[in-house]
Image: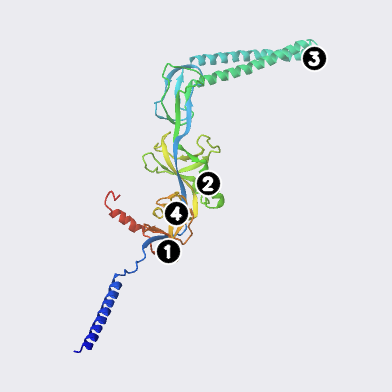
């Protein structure tokens, strides 16, 4: 082969090698380029307002429906105690017997004085009638007639005084039988037989409390009360069904009281030391399960919010200032941040009063590492799947 041909061949071989290397480089560059990342999948809840009954849970304390402190109305010696401490008593039942002897003697003395006054009356009446006839004939003076008439009025007054004295003595004798003014359960006695008591003494002999029904007094913040009135005025809460008058009770051991109560009244004065007003509810208590002085939890129905917006609590987070926020998915499948106004917790959800509108899709799962403006794939949130996943987790969970 000629030298010229050899040089031409070498050039073609070198050019082919360059082309082969270039093609290999293109293949390797194509293989090293990563595929585009898929949009992250998030679970969303579509906001749909619905009516709910709003309730408020407040602590309360029970108190007796009626309380009567037993005190003597006469001075005397206690002869008998006629009840068992801690037992139920009926209205009118005799509880104590005060020595009646002095009062029986006083009654007899008053009756005798009354009899004497009545015995003098006919003679005085006859004298007045006779003087009246003689006065017409001027057989007696006017002064004599006036004295006889005055004596008649005195005798009649003595009879009235005697009758009042007898009635007083009879009342005092009746007061020696100290009776129960109301029906209920009586407590311990502060005196025994042989004790000296005085009328209307400061120390009560015993105390009767009516336990069925029973009161539950609930303090409520004046601020919450004003907020409730404002919502009622704005139409945010409806009470037309009348269900707000019922109250549910939880006992100190956490069990629910089986009977509903009725909200009776609300104090009109704010306690200056606590800034609260007192609500009073009445509960039936036939089994005496509630005793005065117990601390309980009450659930008071405020009314119905006809267009409540509820969001699962895992879909609401807090910014650095503690303000509640939520991420939603807009029409372009991108995330957007919303600032919320949260009213209260309703079960495992937040009641949102501002920041969301019907139709908004709130992200409740897949929030980790998300930022506003991120393109996502939204799928409906399933509460059942979440519960199942939580149930399948090992005990204790991960930190």
The mark lying in front, picked from 3 and 4, is 4
Along the polypeptide, which appears first: circle 3 or circle 1?
A: 3
Along the polypeptide, which appears first: circle 2 or circle 1?
A: 2
In this rendered view, identify the residue nearer to me: 331 or 189: 331
Along the polypeptide, which appears first: circle 4 or circle 2?
A: 2
Residue positioned 45% across, 61% down in the render? 360
Q: Which residue is mark 1?
A: 334
How far is disc 3 from disc 4 in space, using C-alphas? 112 Å
Along the polypeptide, which appears first: circle 1 or circle 4?
A: 4
Whether residues under marks 2 and 1 lie with C-beta atoms below 8 angstroms apart, the answer is no
> In this view of the protein, can residue 50 be seen by the observer?
no
Q: Residue furthest right?
A: 138
Label 3, residues with CA under 10 Å away: few <14, some 14-19, many ≥20: few
Residue positioned 77% across, 14% down in the render? 133
Q: Secondary structure at mark 1?
A: loop
Q: Which residue is mark 3?
A: 136
Q: Secondary structure at mark 3?
A: helix
Q: Position of residue 13 (x, y in %)?
A: 23, 82
Along the polypeptide, which appears first: circle 2 or circle 3?
A: 3
Q: Secondary structure at mark 2?
A: helix
Q: Which residue is mark 4?
A: 325
How far is disc 3 from disc 1 in space, using C-alphas? 125 Å
Q: Is residue 129 left or right of residue 83?
A: right
Q: Secondary structure at mark 4?
A: strand
Q: Is residue 135 left or right of residue 166?
A: right
In the rendered view of the protein, which quadrant contains the N terminus? bottom left
Which quadrant of the structure image shows residue 108? top right
The mark lying in front, picked from 4 and 2, is 4
Q: Which residue is mark 2?
A: 227
Q: Position of residue 128 (x, y in %)?
A: 72, 14
């Amino acid at each position: 082969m000629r030298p010229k041909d050899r040089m031409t061949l070498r050039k073609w071989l070198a050019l082919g090698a360059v082309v082969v290397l270039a093609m290999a480089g293109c293949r390797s560059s194509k293989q090293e380029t990563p595929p585009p990342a898929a949009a992250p999948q998030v679970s969303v809840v579509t906001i749909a307002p619905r009516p709910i009954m709003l309730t408020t849970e407040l602590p309360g304390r029970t108190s007796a429906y009626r309380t009567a402190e037993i005190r003597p109305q006469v001075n005397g010696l206690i002869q008998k105690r006629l009840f068992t401490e801690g037992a139920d008593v009926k209205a009118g039942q005799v509880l104590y017997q005060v020595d009646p002897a002095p009062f029986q003697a006083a009654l007899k003395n008053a009756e005798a004085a009354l009899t004497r006054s009545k015995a003098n009356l006919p003679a005085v009446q006859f004298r007045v009638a006779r003087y009246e006839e003689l006065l017409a004939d001027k057989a007696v003076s006017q002064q004599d007639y006036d004295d006889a008439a005055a004596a008649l009025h005195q005798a009649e007054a003595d009879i009235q005084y005697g009758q009042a004295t007898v009635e007083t003595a009879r009342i005092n004798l009746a007061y020696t039988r100290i009776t129960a003014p109301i029906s209920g359960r009586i407590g311990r006695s502060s005196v025994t037989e042989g004790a000296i008591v005085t009328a209307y003494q400061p120390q009560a002999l015993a105390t009767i409390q009516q336990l069925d029904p029973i009161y539950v007094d609930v303090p409520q913040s004046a601020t919450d009360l004003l907020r409730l009135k404002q919502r009622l005025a704005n139409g945010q809460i409806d009470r037309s069904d009348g269900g707000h008058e019922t109250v549910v009770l939880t006992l100190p051991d956490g069990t629910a009281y089986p009977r509903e109560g009725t909200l009776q009244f609300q104090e009109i004065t704010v306690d200056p030391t606590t800034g609260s007003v007192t609500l009073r509810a009445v509960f039936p208590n036939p089994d005496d399960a509630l005793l005065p002085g117990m601390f309980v939890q009450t659930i008071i129905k405020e009314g119905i919010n006809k267009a409540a917006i509820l969001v699962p609590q895992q879909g609401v987070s807090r910014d650095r200032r503690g303000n509640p926020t939520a991420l939603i998915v807009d029409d372009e499948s991108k995330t957007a941040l919303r600032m919320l106004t949260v009213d209260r917790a309703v079960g495992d959800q937040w009641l949102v009063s501002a920041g969301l509108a019907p139709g908004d899709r709130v992200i409740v799962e897949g929030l980790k590492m998300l930022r506003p403006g991120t393109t996502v794939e939204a799928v409906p949130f399933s509460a059942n799947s979440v519960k199942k996943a939580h149930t399948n987790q090992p005990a204790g969970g991960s930190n």
